[in-house]
Image (cartoon, rainbow, N blue to C red):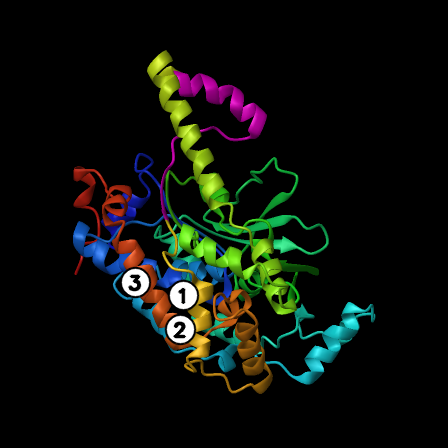
């Protein structure tokens, strides 16, 4: 447990606030576990203390991981390993299933059959797959009451998860903090709601459209937050973060990989291939753009200070606060993303026969999808492949990718010498 001295440090107004930002991507989220495992174990040994984490934001599967980490933040020695075990113990059949009746029902809905709200599954409705197992997993794996306890005791400043409101298409950021947060955004397409975050908020954030059920919260339906905010950096900054560890789940193709993809595009694509590309487009990753904009703002603030002195930021922000509701400040960030194509990894894993799927329809869909893409890429299966062995591969990849950025991570999470005695030592 964190000591009371560490609580004093966390409440210090002078210490930069650190946030972890976790992106969406279904079963690809195991990659995030590898990064968190590296931070809690190898980086902790390198620095000699457990790093303070003040703010955690997540979307979709990132919301699942974020909530677990927020609830166990008072257990820095064990929380990453516990999250790892949750993932590596999974089988697809634990979380997802599909029957011919489900396919028939979705088909009727697509051609305009009216939806009978009386047949909805509790707080959720629609969706090709039966996600009852996923709901049980989310409800049971996270000690939800501990989120409030960690916020109350100062172990955590804020947790935020993003979802998409079905009626408006707007992003809704559900936030839980020690104090009621005023709505921060002047973006007409983003709304902030103070909430006591629980399983339903996270399931809504992770509800991949059409494939998973939409989730009802407060009488209104929500679906996957990744449709508009797949990597929730903005909520972390709005909640006061000065430093960001951003973990996204989209691989940037090398020139060689792009060449293969261009050649595969010379033949008319299989419909399942197009469906996967549509899902990838829906979950568009704006991380590089957001980070580039952040770097430009940092450069402007630094140049202004050099040209006009220390008062530059204060004068600028007096006016900017009126215009945009918040001041600008320098933000440090480290971005970790997969060095390998997770879709290609999923294709190889399925074709190797390692996937443990007892549901015949789902197993057939996975195999046919991969065959349709000639074993080169597997968008949809990589979102649905909740297999413990595949998760282990992604966790190892996340750990390795994080280790390659150890110096940047150490700089990001470093604290002043006088603060180190207040931190929980690495036991």
Would residue 7 be visible to someone looking at this image? Answer: yes
Task: Specify start and end residues of the magenta stretch as a single range.
Answer: 312-335
Q: Do the residues labelled 2 and 1 touch (CB within 8 Å)?
A: yes
Gap in angstroms between the C-alphas marked 3 and 2: 26 Å
Question: Residue 425, image x and y in percent?
Answer: 18, 54
Count of numbered marks: 3
Q: What element carries label 1?
A: helix
- As for residue 218 lying within the magenta part, the answer is no
On the rendered structure, is 350 left or right of 308?
A: right
Q: Considering the image in quadrants, where does the C terminus appear?
A: bottom left
Task: Please identify the quarter of the rendering in which residue 28 is found.
Answer: bottom left
Circles 3 and 2: CB distance less than 8 Å?
no
Left-right relation of 208 to 355: right
Q: Quadrant of the N terminus?
A: bottom left
Question: Which comes sooner in the sequence, label 1 or label 3?
Answer: 1
379 and 98: which is toward the camera: 379
Please say whether residue 142 is visible from this viewpoint.
no
Q: Tag 2 or tag 3, which sits nearer the N-term?
A: 3
Question: In the image, is 87 to the left or to the right of 40?
Answer: right
Task: Decide which of tag 2 and tag 1 comes sooner along the chain.
Answer: 1
Query: For residue 75, which numbered disc appears in the image?
Result: 3
- For label 1, the residue is 30
Question: Which SS class for mark 2?
Answer: helix
Q: Does the magenta stretch include residue 322?
A: yes
Real-space Cα separation, disc 2 to disc 1, in angstroms: 9 Å
């Amino acid at each position: 447990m964190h000591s009371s001295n560490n609580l004093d440090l966390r409440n210090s107004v002078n210490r930069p606030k650190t946030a972890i930002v976790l992106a969406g991507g279904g079963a690809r989220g195991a990659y995030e576990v590898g990064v968190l495992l590296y931070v809690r174990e190898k980086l902790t040994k390198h620095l000699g203390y457990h790093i303070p984490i003040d703010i955690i934001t997540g979307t979709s599967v990132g919301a699942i991981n974020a909530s677990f980490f927020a609830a166990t933040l008072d257990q820095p020695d064990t929380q990453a390993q516990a999250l790892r075990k949750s993932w590596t113990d999974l089988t697809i059949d634990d979380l997802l299933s599909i029957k011919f009746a489900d396919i028939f029902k979705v088909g009727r809905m697509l051609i305009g059959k009216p939806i009978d709200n009386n047949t909805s599954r509790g707080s959720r409705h629609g969706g090709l797959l039966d996600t009852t197992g996923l709901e049980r997993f989310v409800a049971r794996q996270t000690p939800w009451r501990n989120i409030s306890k960690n916020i109350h005791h100062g172990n955590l400043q804020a947790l935020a998860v993003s979802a998409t409101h079905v009626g408006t298409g707007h992003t809704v950021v559900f936030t839980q903090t020690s104090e009621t947060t005023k709505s921060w955004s002047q973006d007409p397409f983003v709304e902030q709601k103070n909430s006591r975050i629980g399983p339903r908020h996270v399931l809504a954030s992770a509800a991949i459209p059409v494939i998973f059920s939409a989730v009802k919260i407060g009488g209104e339906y929500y679906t996957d937050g990744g449709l508009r905010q797949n990597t929730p950096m903005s909520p972390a900054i709005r909640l006061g973060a000065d430093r960001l560890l951003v973990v996204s789940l989209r691989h940037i193709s090398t020139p060689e990989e792009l060449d293969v993809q261009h050649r595969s595009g010379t033949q008319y694509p299989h419909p399942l291939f197009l469906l996967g590309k549509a899902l990838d487009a829906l979950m568009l990753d704006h991380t590089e753009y957001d980070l580039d904009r952040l770097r430009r703002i940092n450069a402007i603030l630094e140049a202004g200070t050099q040209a006009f002195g220390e008062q530059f930021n204060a004068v600028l922000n007096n006016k900017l606060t009126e215009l945009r509701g918040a001041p600008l400040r320098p933000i440090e960030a480290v971005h970790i993303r997969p060095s390998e194509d997770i879709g290609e990894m999923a294709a190889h894993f399925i074709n190797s026969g390692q996937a443990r799927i007892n549901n015949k329809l789902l197993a057939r869909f996975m195999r046919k999808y991969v065959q349709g893409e000639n074993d080169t890429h597997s968008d949809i299966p990589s979102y649905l492949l909740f297999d413990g062995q595949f998760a282990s591969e992604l966790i190892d990849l996340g750990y390795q990718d994080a280790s390659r950025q150890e110096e940047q991570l150490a700089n990001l999470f470093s604290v002043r010498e006088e603060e180190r005695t207040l931190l929980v030592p690495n036991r």
